[in-house]
Amino acid sequence: MSDYRNQLAVQRERQLAALREKNGIFEQFTLHCACAMHDKEFRAVFVKRPGAARYAWEKSERIADRSGLPSRGTSHRPNSKTIKVEEADFDFLCEFCGSEGWTLCKCGAFVCGQKKKGNRFQCRASCGREYTTQPLTEVPGSSGHSPAAAIGHLRAKLLRGRRSE
């Protein structure tokens, strides 16, 4: 019986992947990032297309509103998801200064390498931390699907009517 259930689960996963690809819905991974030079924040959005082995950088979005972001000094994010470093291509540039190389700071942001010298890291002015870095094995972020519609959810407008009691 369990082999049958496993086969059904694999079949369903393939059907969902095909449906997501057909409708342009991809798995997303988002990082909360900051510029060390300009002390400004942005989100880096990575997408994993069906059949792809790794997440690829899709876009960066400047942050005007901090709602939904972790408070400084914490790493809790809504829809938290942690991936292994090997699961994504982190070759993207800072949205504000154009530098590359990223360090996960204790303030909860991935900070660009603008102020990094060797393995000595200096965070943005609002954080002020400075320390020697170690290689990462896992990356904390948040998950979702792109576009925002999830499979199985209806986008119908509900009409007002009388409630039956």
Image (tube, rainbow, N blue to C red):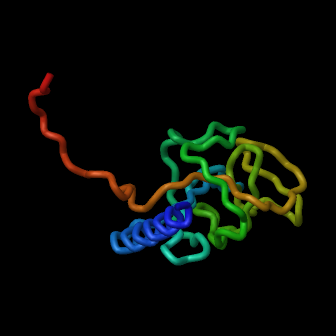
Q: Quadrant of residue 100?
A: bottom right
Q: Position of residue 65 (x, y in %)?
A: 49, 43
Q: Residue at x 40, y 74 (%)?
A: 18
Q: Nearer the viewer, residue 62 or 90?
A: 90
Q: Position of residue 127 (x, y in %)?
A: 74, 42
Q: Position of residue 113 (x, y in %)?
A: 75, 63
Q: Quadrant of residue 90?
A: bottom right
Residue that sits furthest to the left in the current view: 162
Q: Nearer the viewer, residue 112 or 82?
A: 82
Q: Residue at x 52, y 50 (%)?
A: 63
* Placement of the C terminus among the 4 image quadrants: top left
Residue that sits furthest to the top in the current view: 165
Q: Position of residue 76 (x, y in %)?
A: 64, 41
- Vertical comparison of 2 with 165: above or below: below
Q: Nearer the viewer, residue 3 or 147?
A: 3
Q: Residue at x 58, y 70 (%)?
A: 55
Q: Residue at x 40, y 66 (%)?
A: 25
Q: Nearer the viewer, residue 138 or 154?
A: 154
